[in-house]
Amino acid sequence: MTRPRLPLPSRQEIALGIITVLWGGTYYIIQMALKTSGPLFFIGVRFLIAALFVVCFVGRKRIMQGIPRAEIWRGGLIGVVLAFGYICQTIGLMTITSSRSAFLTALYVPLVPLLQWIILRKAPSKSGIAGIFLAFVGLVLLAEPWKSGLTMSTGDGLTLLGTFSYAFEIICVGLFALQTDSRRMAFVQLVAGGLFAFCAMPVMGEHIPPFSWGWLSCALVMGVVSAATQLVLNWAQKTVSPTKATIIYSSEPIWGGLVGWCTGDVLTTCTLVGAGFIVAGVLASEVKPRWPRFRRTLRGGAVRETPLERKRRRRPSMSDLVIRGSSED
């Protein structure tokens, strides 16, 4: 009987997983920064510092010389969408609880394959749908929305806008990744996001805070994380589909919960069960049974591979084609 195969994750998927672990541990840093700075100013400073780190990591000549106009508007669009999502979520957290915000933000898990289907005309696979469902159930259990009810407020609406922004940003990166240089795109996104946050300050009535080593040190740490995130995200999503990327990102609350536990938070049984559902979602998205062979085995037929199956199995994967044909790697 043929067993479901569990392929080893690619290096792009491993990189996205590491970034998700780092990102899940930044909530505590953001909370510290907001004690001495407004949300828009901190987001703007963080994004521009991250852009500076991208230049340091990659090199000024590779970034600044000859940026095509297409990469400027594509990266600018993604940067504005990303910054808008952070702004909405941060402002929403000022009026609603963190658990309620987590539940509403979790809606980007089913939104990504839905938008992918609408925009890219690419329906998710059955294993991807199962993984998305399990991950979404886990996120709901982590958030425990039944404790605060389901009434809609201004904070809820802002958080929902941020959720749509996150989903659309993942789709845009997947749509533009193969057509652009990932390093230049990361730089343009961060600069556009930082400038957008600064331009939004007078509209929202936010002023520049007095200098503090608190928000500056937090911005430096978050700048490094943001730079690494955008570089890895634009590189990895050349070969990782938006649906699978969303499954990987959905493990972020697990790492955030672990960091919270290390700082004194209590992990309830519901939280642990939700984390288990998210892990199950990740595994479900990776398990890909060879259904034709499985059905033949159930009928008592031969289990040997057909010539067509051997030919398909020996074809190079998309990641092999991109890695061998790209000069970036």
Image: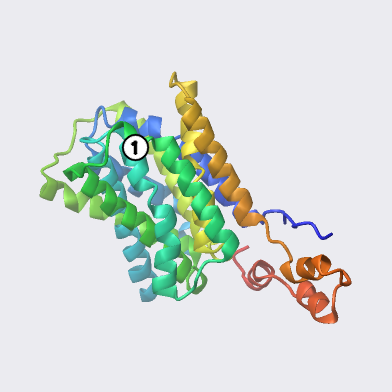
Identity of the residue furthest to the front in this view = 299
Left or right, 112 with reference to 132: left
| Residue to which mark 1 is pinned | 145
Crowding around mark 1 (Cα neighbors within 10 Å: few <14, some 14 to 19, many 20+) is some
Q: Is residue 187 visible?
A: no
Number of numbered discs visible in the structure rendering: 1
Identity of the residue furthest to the top in this view = 264
Q: What is the three-letter code of the residue carrying label 1?
A: Pro
Q: Secondary structure at mark 1?
A: helix
| 109 w.r.t. 38: above or below | below
Left or right, 47 with reference to 56: left
| 285 w.r.t. 143: above or below | below
Q: How is the image coloured?
A: rainbow
Among the 4 quarters of the image, the one containing residue 32: top left
Task: Say which residue appears at 37% left-offset and 55% top-offset.
Answer: 166
Q: Quadrant of the N terminus?
A: bottom right
| 267 w.r.t. 81: above or below | above
Task: Say which residue appears at 85% left-offset and 80% top-offset.
Answer: 307
Q: Is residue 179 visible?
A: yes
Task: Say which residue appears at 39% left-offset and 54% top-offset.
Answer: 108
| Residue 146 percent across, percent down from the top left | 33, 35
| Residue 23 percent across, percent down from the top left | 46, 41
Closer to the camera in the image, 249 or 291: 291
Closer to the camera in the image, 296 or 30: 296
Q: Quadrant of the C terminus?
A: bottom right
| Residue 279 percent across, percent down from the top left | 58, 43
| Residue 4 percent across, percent down from the top left | 74, 57
Among the 4 quarters of the image, the one containing residue 209: top left
